[in-house]
Image (cartoon, rainbow, N blue to C red):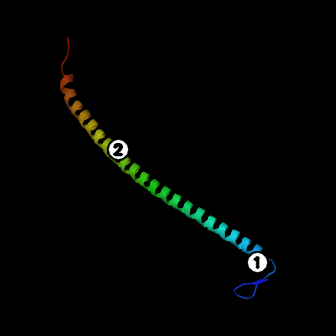
Amino acid sequence: MMKSATKDKVYKSPVRKLARFFEKSRDQWKAKCREAKTTIKYLKNRVRFLEDSREHWKSRARELEARVKQMEAKERESKEKHESLEPSESKKTFR
């Protein structure tokens, strides 16, 4: 029989079986911890990638919005210029 360090638990199983059981138990929680650590690392990398990607697309959208505004302003200018030229041309009559 083996007594624990706190002397309140007495194991009835042979020490060789207990040793194997505790070793297996230890190996299982170590594997579980390694797996969790790997998962955490993967998720942190994924979050970083997604944040970078999100920032990239946000800046791209801002650039394109600015470009659209510039093109709309150019279009307005062209329309105004065309409208200012149109009345003088409409006075011309073809016979």
Q: Nearer the viewer, residue 5 or 78?
A: 5
Residue 18: horizontal and vertical position, in percent?
A: 75, 75
Q: Viewed as shown, does residue 93 lie left or right of 5?
A: left
Mark closest to the chain's N terminus, 2 or 1: 1
| Type of the residue with mark 2 | Leu
Quadrant in the picture for residue 30: bottom right
Q: Nearer the viewer, residue 6 or 53?
A: 6
Q: Viewed as shown, does residue 83 lie left or right of 57?
A: left
Q: Nearer the viewer, residue 59 or 45?
A: 45
The disc placed on residue 57 is: none
Q: Viewed as shown, does residue 46 lie left or right of 95?
A: right
Q: Is residue 24 above or below residue 63?
A: below
Q: Is residue 47 above or below residue 84?
A: below
Residue 40: horizontal and vertical position, in percent?
A: 54, 62
Dividing the image into 4 quarters, which one contains the N terminus? bottom right
Q: Nearer the viewer, residue 60 or 65?
A: 60
Q: Residues within 10 Å of mark 1 (few under 14, many from 20)?
A: few
Point out the residue furthest to the front here: 16
Residue at the image position 20 percent from the left and 32 percent from the top: 84
Q: Is residue 8 above or below residue 42?
A: below
Residue at the image position 21 percent from the left and 33 percent from the top: 81
Q: Nearer the viewer, mark 2 or mark 1?
A: 1
Q: Is residue 69 above or below residue 87?
A: below
Dividing the image into 4 quarters, which one contains the C terminus? top left
Real-space Cα distance between discs 2 and 1?
72 Å
Residue at the image position 38 percent from the left and 47 percent from the top: 61
Secondary structure of the residue carrying numbered label 2: helix
The disc placed on residue 64 is: 2
Is disc 2 in contact with disc 1, using a CB cutoff of under 8 Å? no
Residue position marked by numbered label 1 in the rendering: 15
Residue at the image position 19 percent from the left and 17 percent from the top: 93
| Type of the residue with mark 1 | Val
